[in-house]
Amino acid sequence: MRRRGAGGVARCGGFGGGGDRPRDEPHCWWSESEHWTHLRRCLHDEALPLDVRVTGALTLLYGMPITRIVALTRSDLTGGSPPHLRIGEHPVALPPAVHQLLQRQADPTEPISAVGRITPRPSWLIPGYAAGTHHSAPALARKMRLHGLPARPSRNTALLALAADLPASVLSDTLGISISAALQWTRRAARDWNSYLAARSTEDRE
């Protein structure tokens, strides 16, 4: 299915072209060039809404689900050298460009109410429209699709890449996913990584 916005087409139907994958297998992903194109958009495209850029960067880099992203608070983002974001059990070091993006989201201009009063800053990293609430995950997911950044292929691509490099226990602690989910991803990575790379290489040449 083609998506609006910059980028390409999310590949669906199983890694390496297999059409008989179990239903719980990841069926949609980005090619390598698409993955980096979307990440560059999130980091540098000022035409995109800031919450879309933040959500896209976290999904593309860390495979975070949107339900987890909307639950982040400003206190989950810490300074220091390097700065960190608490995703799972342990804070994750952030690349400078990602930290700058999240810092912009965490420190908006002081909101002014309709009667001219300064209202308190929200504690949520991506606040909702109603005071004291975070953004709705379904609404944010629709917004991501509208801007050509659907979460499913972005998350699948990130998790497969991370699972190829990290043991399941580290993946679970770092990303805050269950150990069973982490084990599934590491098994998928071990089984599919070579086929996945071959498929991406072919697609990038097309």
Image (cartoon, rainbow, N blue to C red):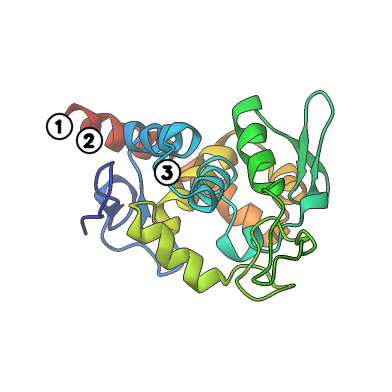
- How far is the residue under mark 1 from the one under mark 3? 21 Å
CB within 8 Å, label 1 to label 2: yes
Q: Which mark is residue 101?
A: none
The answer to whether residue 137 is above or below residue 44 is below
Determine the residue positioned at 83% across, 51% down.
75
Q: Residues within 10 Å of mark 3 (few under 14, many from 20)?
A: some
CB within 8 Å, label 1 to label 3: no
SS of the residue under disc 3: helix
* Quarter of the image that includes the C terminus: top left
Give coordinates of residue 34: x percent, y percent.
Answer: 33, 37
Nearer-N-terminus badge (1/3): 3
Give coordinates of residue 105: x percent, y percent.
Answer: 64, 47
Q: For the view shown, which residue lies furthest in the front direction?
A: 116
Residue tagged 1: 206
Residue tagged 3: 192
Determine the residue positioned at 52% across, 47% down.
50
Q: Amino acid at mark 1?
A: Glu
Nearer-N-terminus badge (3/2): 3
Q: Amino acid at mark 2?
A: Glu
The answer to whether residue 94 is above or below residue 144 is above
Q: Which mark is residue 203?
A: 2
Where residue 100 sits, quadrant-wise, is top right
- How far is the residue under mark 1 from the one under mark 2? 5 Å
Determine the residue positioned at 53% across, 42% down.
57
- How far is the residue under mark 3 from the one under mark 2? 16 Å
The answer to whether residue 202 is above or below residue 74 is above
Q: Amino acid at mark 3?
A: Asp
Where residue 144 sits, quadrant-wise, is bottom left
